[in-house]
Image (spheres, coloured by chain):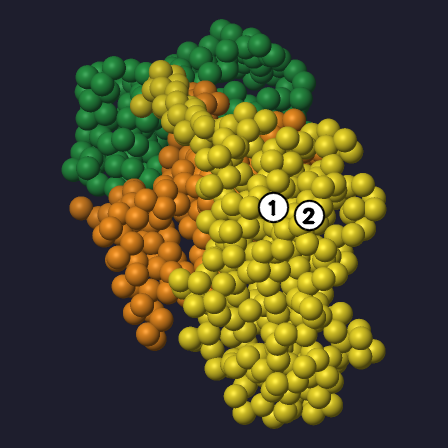
Chain colours: A yellow, B orange, C green
Amino acid sequence: MLSRQSIKSSMRILLTALLLAVLAITAGAAAPTREVILATTTSTADTGLLDALIPVFEKKTGYIVKTIAVGTGQALALGGRGEADVLLTHAPSSELPLVSSGDVIERRLVMHNDFIIAGPAGDPAKVRGLKLAADALSRIESSQSVFVSRGDDSGTHKKEKEIWGKLGVKPSGKWYVEAGAGMAHTLNIASEKEGYTLTDRGTYLALKKNLALDVLVEGDAILLNIYHVMQVNPAKFSKVNGPGGLAFVEFMVSPEVQKIISTFGVDKYGDPLFFPDAGKNVDDLGK
Amino acid sequence: MDLIAEGIAQAFWLLMKGDRGVFQIALLTLKVSGLATLISLAIGVPLGTALALGRFRGRDAVASIVNTGMGLPPVVVGLWVSIVLWRYGPLGSLRLMYTPTAMVIAQTLIALPIITGLTMSGIGQLDPGIRVQILSLGATRWQLIWLLVREARLAILAAVMAGFGRVIAEVGASMMVGGNVVGQTRVLTTATSMEVGRGNFGTAIALSLILMGLTLAITSWLTHLQQKGRPTAQ
Amino acid sequence: MISLKDVQLRRAGRLVLDIADLSVGRGESVAVIGPNGAGKSTLLQVMACLLPPDSGSLTVLGERIERGADLIGIRRRTAMVLQRACLLNTSVYENVALGLRIRRTPDAAIRDRVINALSMFRVDHLARRPARALSGGESQRVSLARAFALEPDILFLDEPFNALDLATRTALLSEVGEAVRSFGATTIFVTHDVTEIPFLSDRTIVMDGGRIVADGSIRRVLADDTRSALSELLRSASWLCGKDGDDDSEDGTSFPLADSKG
C-alpha cells in the first residue's frame, strides 16, 4: 500500500477517471460555422417565444443556436464586441448607436408588444383609463404613491426613464422603489406593496393570477415595446458567424415566422403576446 | 406554504414522468461540478500538502493568496473567465465560451482554492513529530506525502465536500460562462434562477429540491467515507 | 559506525552544534546528556541523517553523507524513538508495521516481526486497538516496538522516557536496556536525566552549548566533574544518589559511585 506500485496505480486510476470525465464533457462540440450565438434579453426569453421559434430555425437551417438571455445592456455590449452573431432586443434608442458605428447591420423590425401601467385596484393616484402614460406617472409622482421600478437598466427600465424624461422629472423618495430585478420580481414587489409599476404586457399576463394588480393605463404610443433583430457585422468582426447571423435575421422577418408570432400566446392567455411588424415603417406603429 | 407543496408535487411529477429535460439538466450538473471537484482534488491536495510542508521563500504569500481565493465570489470568477474565453479574448480561439468546458474551468477556479486551503490547514495541523518519525523510518518523499494525506484524510474529505458543495450550488459563474443555453449548458442552479425570474416558483422549488437531493446523496456518501476513517474504540 | 569531524550547524546565526571529533563504534551504546538547549537532539538528528550540517564531514554506516548520498537507504537501516510516540491514526499493529511497509517487506515477514516486537514490549494484547486510544505509557511501548521491529543497525533514542510517569519509566528502562543488550545494536541515547544512563549505556557524552565537554565512562565523567553543566544536573538528581553515604555533602556534587570505585 506504500509501495511505489500502489501509489502509482492510484494515480493512474485518478488520471483515467479525469480523462474520461473530460471527454464526457467536451464531446459533442459543434463546428464553428454551425453555431450561431443569439444575444437577447431575459424578458424576451421569458415570454417563451424563442422556445417556439428556435427549434424551427435549427431544423430548417441546420444551425445550432446558443441563446444567451441577459440584460439589454449586456446583450448590446456583446454585440458591440463581436461576441455574439445576432441580436434580438427591444431598446431602439440604445440600438441605434450600434448601427451608426457599424457594429450591427441588417437591422430589421420584427414585432412589438406593449407596456402597460399596472397598479392596485384601489388606484389611489387615480390613473385608470388615462390616455397618456406621462400623465399617469405625473399623478403617481405628485401623490407620492408607491411606484416600483425595474432599476436595472433593462429595456423596460429605459422605457420608464424615457417617460419620466418627458415630464422632466427625476423620481426619488420613499415612494419610488428601485427593485434592481427582473420583471417577475418587480411585479411581485409591486403586488405586495400595492404599488404601481410599468410592465410589459406579456409578463403581466403570465403572472396575472398571482398578482393583485390591474391594467390601468395602456395604448399610448410611447408604451410600445419595439423589437428589432440585427446581425453583428462580420466585416467588422471577422470571428462572427456572418451567414448564420444573416440566416436568423431573415428567418425572423419571414412570413412563416411572422405568422407564428401573431398567434403566440393565444392558447395560453387568450390574447397574443406580440404583434408582427416585419416590413413596416417603425414610425407607423401604434397609430 | 402552498408554494412548497406545489413545488414538492411538481418535483415528484417531473421525476416520475422521467422528464428528459430535467434529467439532462441534472446529469449535466453532476458532470460539470463532479469534474471540477475532481480536477481541484487532483491539483489541490498535492498543492496544499506542498504548501503545508514546504519551506520556501514566498510560501506565506502563496498561502495568503490561497486563503483569499477561498472567498472568491463566483460571479467575479465568471467575469474573469469570460474575459479570457471570449472570442476576442486571449483564449478566444479555443471557442469555449458557452460550453460545459467553460463552466468546468470556472468551477474549478472556485473549488481549487477551497480544497487547497483546507488541505493545507489539515496537513499543517498534524503533529510535526509524525513527519519526523515517518522520515526517520526511511520514507521517500512520495511515501511521506501519501502517509500524511492518509493521516489527514478526515480534513481532506471535509475539504472535498466543501469544494463540491460550493460549486454545485453556484450560479453566477455558470450563468456568465455557460449562458444557461437549453440542452447545452443549462444546469440546475441556472435553471432554478431562470424559473424564479419568470415567476414560476413551483418549478423553481421543484428544481431546487432535485438539486438538494443530489447534493445530499453525494455528501452523505462522502460523509460515510469520512466517518469510516474515524478511530473508534473496539 | 558513525563519525563526525568538524561538524557545525547554525540556526539564525547562532552556532547550535560544534563537534570537533566524535566516533561511535559498532555495538556501542552511548548516552548523550546535557542541559536544555545543549544541542543533544540536534546532534541526534544530524547523526540520523534527518538534518544536514552546515559544514564538516559525517560518515554513517560507512557512507560519507554528502550531496547525492543515499539518505533513504541509511535511514532504513536505523530507527528512532522520540519523546512522544507520534503514532498514526490506525491500529497498533499497522503502526508497528509501518517501517516494514515502507521498506516493502513482504506481508508474511511483517507479521512475524510485528508480533515479536509487540510481545517484546508486552503490548501484544493491544494489536487491534486504534493507536490513538492508548495511554502515554502504552503509546511509548508501541513506539519502541515499531523501532525494534526493524532490527536496526543503529538505534536513536531521543529522551523517550521523559514524558512517562515514574512507574512506567522504571519498568521501561529495564525492558529497553534488556532489549538493547540482547540486540547488540549501536545505540545513541539522549537524555537529560543522569539516573537513566546506567540502564542503557556506559559511555557518556556531556554536551553544553553545542559542544562536547566530556566523553568517557559514566563514572569517570561524573568524578571528573569540574564542568558546571553536569553539576546542575547532579544537583537535581543528588537526592536519588544519596543511599551510599555522603548524602549530606555541602554542595551536593559528589556522586557515591565515583567515590566507591575510584
Toward which corner of the image does residue C214 lie, by quadrant?
A: top right
Q: In the image, which disc is placed on residue A141?
A: none
- Dot 2 or dot 1, earlier in sequence: 2
The amino acid type found where label 1 is placed reads Val
Q: Classify A102 as above or below B72.
A: above
Callout 1: residue from which chain?
A
| Residue pointed to by mark 1 | A253
User: Is B190 displayed left or right of A243 in the figure?
Assistant: left
| Residue pointed to by mark 2 | A108
- Who's the residue at 27% across and 31% down the image? C94
User: Is A42 displayed left or right of A9 in the figure?
Assistant: right
Residue C219 x %, y %? 46, 28
How many marks overall? 2
Task: Name the one closer to the observer, A59 or A208.
Answer: A59
Judged from the image, the secondary structure of the residue bearing numbered disc 1 is loop
User: Dots 2 and 1: beta carbons under 8 Å?
Assistant: yes
Residue C45 x %, y %? 52, 27
- Who's the residue at 69% across and 68% down the image? A287
Residue farthest to the top? C62
Residue A127 x %, y %? 64, 87
Q: Classify B217 as above or below A188.
A: above
The amino acid type found where label 2 is placed reads Arg
CA gap between label 2 and label 1 equals 8 Å
Q: Examine the rendering and report whether any part of residue C46 can be seen.
A: yes
- Who's the residue at 47% across and 78% down the image? A211
Callout 2: residue from which chain?
A
